[in-house]
Image (cartoon, grey):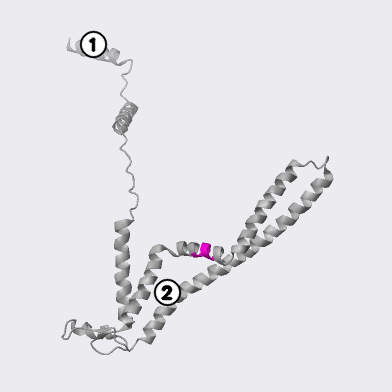
Amino acid sequence: MHPALLIFLVSFINHAITWLGRDLLQEFFRNIYVRVVNFSASSKLSTKKKELYEMRQQLNMTSAQDEFSKWARLRRKVDKLTQEVDEQNKTMASSQFMFSIMFKGFMFVLNSAIPFILNWYFKRVPMFYLPPGDWFGPLGPLFSFPNAPAGAVSSTVWTTVCGRVLALIGAYGRELFVREPMPQLEAPYESAPKASGLKHQEEKDAVPQPVPSAGSGAEKSTLKHRHTKQAS
């Protein structure tokens, strides 16, 4: 296989894992691991849980006072089955924990170790040669960084280009096929103008109005009488 195609496939697999989600893949392979590797232990655990449930039903229907011997015998069986189920659950949990560690290690090797090894192994191998001529000007030597022949594209640059292109494809695909729910706009509050009108009316009512004094008419008549007397 050509080195450029091999590097592209590894980069494509890594980005496909990112698109699908590591947690989803881990759960999928964990179910396969449980069904294939721990099938016998899982079936035994299911059988014991069913038997324990039936024993508890019988124990609840048995009176400890009237049928003490039967109740004690069922109680011992329930305790024994409970202990066996707990031990089996611990074994299954330990097995699943080991699987999660192995899966994370495999993801690290696939995402980091393999690309690094490929770049180091093909560091002097040209992925392909650029067309003859000064197409990229002073940037031309950068395509052969760090150890590829002049005029060629190195494995490091090719890995970077593949990763960037696949990331853009993933972003565009997410925008096209994954539709996010549109935020719902709240309807305008219809009674807002009325509330503002009421507030304005309350402010207007709150302004103190001038109150006419009780003796204002009498004072005016007294002053008028004085002026008339002085004029006469």
| Nearer to us: label 2 or label 1 | 2
Residue 209 to residue 106: above or below:
above
Q: Is residue 137 left or right of residue 53?
A: left
Near-viewer residue (58 or 218): 58
Q: Which percent across, then down, holds residue 154?
A: 30, 84
Mark 2 lies on residue: 111
Find numbered disc 1 in the image and state the secondary structure of the residue it sits on: helix
Residue type indicated by callout 1: His
Please tell me how crowded label 1 is: few (under 14), some (14-19), or many (20+) other residues with Cα within 10 Å.
few
- Which quarter shows the C terminus? top left
Near-viewer residue (168 or 219): 168
The residue located at (68%, 62%) in the rendering is: 87
Find numbered disc 2 in the image and state the secondary structure of the residue it sits on: helix
Q: Is residue 186 left or right of residue 45?
A: left
- In the image, the segment drawn in magenta is 29-33
Mark 1 lies on residue: 225
- Which quarter shows the N terminus? bottom left
The residue located at (32%, 82%) in the rendering is: 2
Q: Which percent across, then down, holds residue 30?
A: 52, 64
Residue type indicated by callout 2: Asn
Q: Is residue 50 left or right of residue 172?
A: right
